[in-house]
Image (tube, grey):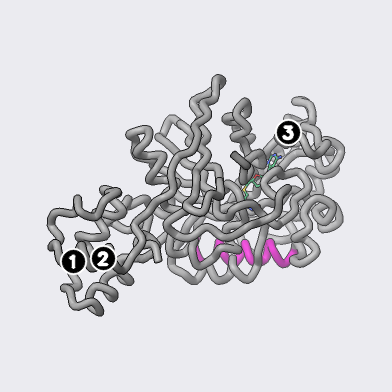
Amino acid sequence: MNIRNMTIEELGRDLVYLGYEKYRCKQLFTWLHKNVIDNIDDATNLSKDLRKTLIEKYDFSMPSIYKEYKSKIDDTKKYLILLNDDDIIESVLMKYSFGYSICISSQVGCNMGCKFCASTIGGMKRNLETYELLSQIYLIQKYNNIKVSNIVIMGLGEPLLNYDNIIRFLKIINDKFGQNIGLRNITLSTCGIIPNIEKLMNENLPINLALSLHASNDEIRKKIMPISNKYKLNDVLNSILKYFEKTNRRITFEYCLIKDINDSKNDAYNLIKLFKDSFKHTHVDFNVNLIPVNEVKENSFKRPDNITISNFKNILENNNISVTIRRELGKDISGSCGQLRASVK
Ligand code: SAH
């Protein structure tokens, strides 16, 4: 078991079980998750005896950065992260006016099968363990000598299908003895796994939720997102409503604009109607984030022209819906939404 998989409470329990003082967990946790030491012998305030016991009982290894790609058009950097079993995932570092944000992967590949997305092409190999989720942040921070302020869980994989590790990840990254990154600065994007959206809202970990909507009705959504065969749009939106009521966090709806699939004026009006119908009894604070589809060489989906995109945006705005168009960062290094892969070396 990798030692960085454990929350501070779990470390404390183990230390007591092994015959050490519980308060040591704070020191140990700080070394592991704030200072991020490679070698436990650097933890000088822990006794030699405790260090020896820990080395015998736990794995301390971390993944490594295999390759860095720097965008020439903006400050985005993409990292191939080599896992201990030789699998590779991708993470992206983005620079904003407010600071740095990292997009992390949650699984090696993805099996959601969204037709427009590169991450799902090779299927899903496995879930990432908690320490592998954390390491993406620790490695990129160290490599660049920076501290990130925001995290988006929007890379490879469907995070709500790696639920337990995501919950541990959130507890650890938010811990004041570790990186202390605020839950308000963390956004998880899901294609809409209803039972786990409802589980998440009861964890007392009020992160921001983004839903990959991409269509205004089930018929279109089914064509591009196979998960819609399992969960109907009305039910998904109902679970989003409950998430909002419970957490009061502003919801993001991601809407990938694809030429001739979901980009017409009619689609925009249907989308407005969908929101009106779904949220007619309760006010929900939400933003629609339009993402002009990014190119993926294996499929033929095309980006709409700029006029179509701004028409779509204007229709929503004229109906008092808050809309943003996602900046296409790191396009030249295939670092944009839907372009990440579990790459082969
Ligand atoms: N599985 C999660 C996390 C992926 S997040 C989810 O579905 O939300 C990545 C976001 O980029 C999602 O909204 C996804 O639908 C979107 N996306 C996927 N492929 C894309 C593409 N080719 N162009 C633009 N956005 C894409």
The amino acid sitting under disc 3 is Glu
Mark 3 and mark 1 residues within 8 Å of each other at the beta carbon = no
Q: Is residue 340 left or right of residue 138?
A: right
Q: Quadrant of residue 65?
A: top left
Mark 2 and mark 1 residues within 8 Å of each other at the beta carbon = yes
- The answer as to whether callout 2 falls within 8 Å of ligand 1 is no
Q: Nearer the viewer, residue 215 or 317?
A: 215
- The answer as to whether callout 3 falls within 8 Å of ligand 1 is yes
Camera-nearest label, 2 or 3: 2
Image coordinates for residue 323, horizontal then vertical, percent: 64, 40
Residue located 40% across and 35% down the image: 99
Mark 2, Cα crowd under 10 Å, few <14 / some 14-19 / many 20+, is some
Q: Quadrant of residue 308?
A: top right
Image coordinates for residue 227, horizontal then vertical, percent: 75, 60
Q: Main secondary structure of the magenta part?
A: helix
In this figure, which residue is indicated by the disc labeled 2? Answer: 54
Residue 238 included in the magenta stretch of the image: yes
Residue range highlighted in magenta: 234-247
Residue at the top extreme, as displayed:
72
